[in-house]
Amino acid sequence: MVVARSLTVLALFPLAALAQKPVPVRLDIPSVKKAVVTIHALDASGEAVASGTGFFVTGGSVVTAAHVLQGAAACSVELSDGQTMRCSVAASDTAKDVVMLLVGGQPPATLRFGTSDDAKDGDEITVVSNPLGELPGTVSKGIVSASRVVGGTKLIQISAAISHGSSGAPVLDSHGQVIGIVRSTITEGQSLNFATATDAVRYMLNSPSAVAEAQGFFAARPAAPAAAAPRAAPVTGGPGRRTIQVGQTVNSTLSSSDEIYSDSTYYQRWSFTTQPNTAITIDLASDDFDPVLLLTGLDSTVVDVRHRGPGCAARIALVFPGAGPYSVVANTSVTPVRQTGRYVLSLTQGLKPLLPDDPCTPAGSSAPAASANGNSMHQIQVGQSVNGSLTTADNLYRDTTYYQYWQFTTTAGTPLTVDLSSDDFDPYLIVRGFHAADGRDSSSVDDDGGPGCAARVATIFPTTGTYTILVNTTSTQKNRTGSFTLSITRGLKPLIPGDCSSSGATAGGGSRAQTEGTITVGQSVQGQLTSSDYLRPADTTYAQWWLLQGHAGQQVTIDLEADSFDAYVFLYGPGLTDGVQDDDGGGNCNARLTVMLPQDGEYRILINTRGKYETGPYTLSVTAGAKPKSLQRCSRR
């Protein structure tokens, strides 16, 4: 009987195993195609010089390969329906060949990052791209051939067919999640194609170095010859193309014969040059239409869609770092549709204040005066400490953070420390005026290098001249304002890395999540994510903190289990500079993280989800020792 019972168990075992086999997930190709876009690299005149592929991810950013935009002066994104949108670089890591772009409006669809570390040789993958820049929505299938590390970057070798124009396309796993970004192909071989693994780049928007690199991504390039333009626009100010000089005011007219953007707005382009480090105010006013100004030739496209000049006029006020050429675009708001009429464009030397973004009133009527702080260039001296305030009347980046300009002068070889602190917001400090080895302007950027969450730049200033400080905030919360203290002292003060983590700021993008309590090794606690919890701007997921006291050399396993959302867990603390994370290591879409704690101290566990806006109850447990990691793919959805 014992034998019979054993045979019965053996006979049933294959059936039980078969019943547990995950049901294959069918890719929603039409939805994927809506999320995939064509990237156009533009020269200084706005003409397309190259193209590639990109895709929308959760949060609304567009991801593509950095080399697609190499040498460009600006970029645009073309959606699957043919609509074209202007874009700017929000984060860049050229070493990994990845950039994240910002565009206006709502994306038609988004893709989710998968876990590239879970990709196994032989796994099926799908690529959706625009080969040759002429075949959008092309679908090719293949397998993961191998994983390799080249120059410190993990690459996934794939067999799916790709061509020129496919660079930047998403590589999708069987669940429709992005595990790679198409990077290159070896033409001498067959199906030798490579993609950058996504695990190393998914949080680029939270990386100060990636954000800093983005600010210098676009270089000003000579404008393309007028003959290369697909259609000629009416010309004023000389043959070939429109030109304007600093100190000049021109009158012109937008008409139905002018060039038109895909959002059905007409525009005229004007070019100008200037002396390096010249402060210039550009004003566009009209009694016939609602004016919008665009400026290209800097590190990224600058758009004024608010009425920051008198009345309804548009105004951009900047210190131009180089000689140019720069392009000013006289444009209109999207509504009413296809506006035309007369306008006045002027370039004046000096920085005029950007007026508060009040409701638009007719041109020529009185407008609120600038505040005492204003948006003009503020002055500070070496050895001075000043108190200021960021307000809603200040300049606004496209990441919805306010900023102010401050200037100071120093002599070559002077060691200085610039400190920015605030009790009202998380400071972000940018110092401009440096020059890279290739001659391009560069910046020194810091988030939490000072005490607590203060920002600090400590460096030897290489040349005699004027430097510009941008007092800014981190983008983890939108539209933050408040008081700050800015100081410049002689000498190099030490940077204090990681000090802000004690008050909740980490690279994981959950700096302002609530701390729910403390958990100890051997304990299990119940919790719940709700819509009132902190929402991470990078991926629109809710987050909570739990604290854990650990000791050097202690091995622990952290399990996060939930039935109503796909669990994701992070661990930060002393010795874990970039933190560690896990998605599905616990099986059945639960997270499991086993780690050897490197130092004594307080560690922070971030409770998070894989999908955006997911909520529900969860169980968090911490046990001593290691537990095996599940190889089962998440298949609940």
Image (spheres, rainbow, N blue to C red):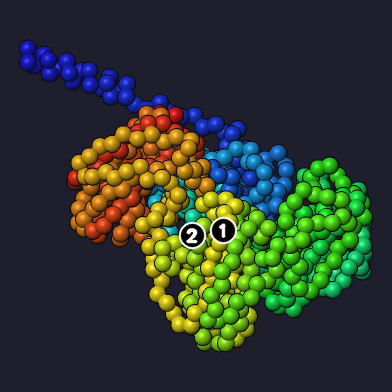
Q: Which residue is mark 1?
A: 482
Q: In the picture shown, does residue 80 fall above or below 440?
A: above
Is residue 101 among the parts visible in the rendering? no
Q: Residue 509's x, y, as percent?
A: 46, 51
Q: Is residue 517 visible?
A: yes
> In the displayed structure, does residue 124 sit left or right of residue 216?
left
Three-letter code, disc 2: Asp
Q: Residue at x 12, y 15 (%)?
A: 5
Which residue occupies the foreground of this view, 394 or 141? 394
Name the residue nearer the viewer: 173 or 371. 371
For the residue labelled by badge 1, is the local secondary structure a helix, a strand or a loop?
A: strand
For badge 1, the amino acid type reads: Gly
- Reply above or below: 241 against 433: above
Residue at 21 percent across and 50 percent down: it is: 555
> Do the residues under discs 1 and 2 have CB atoms within 8 angstroms?
yes
Residue depicted at x 70% and y 48%: 85
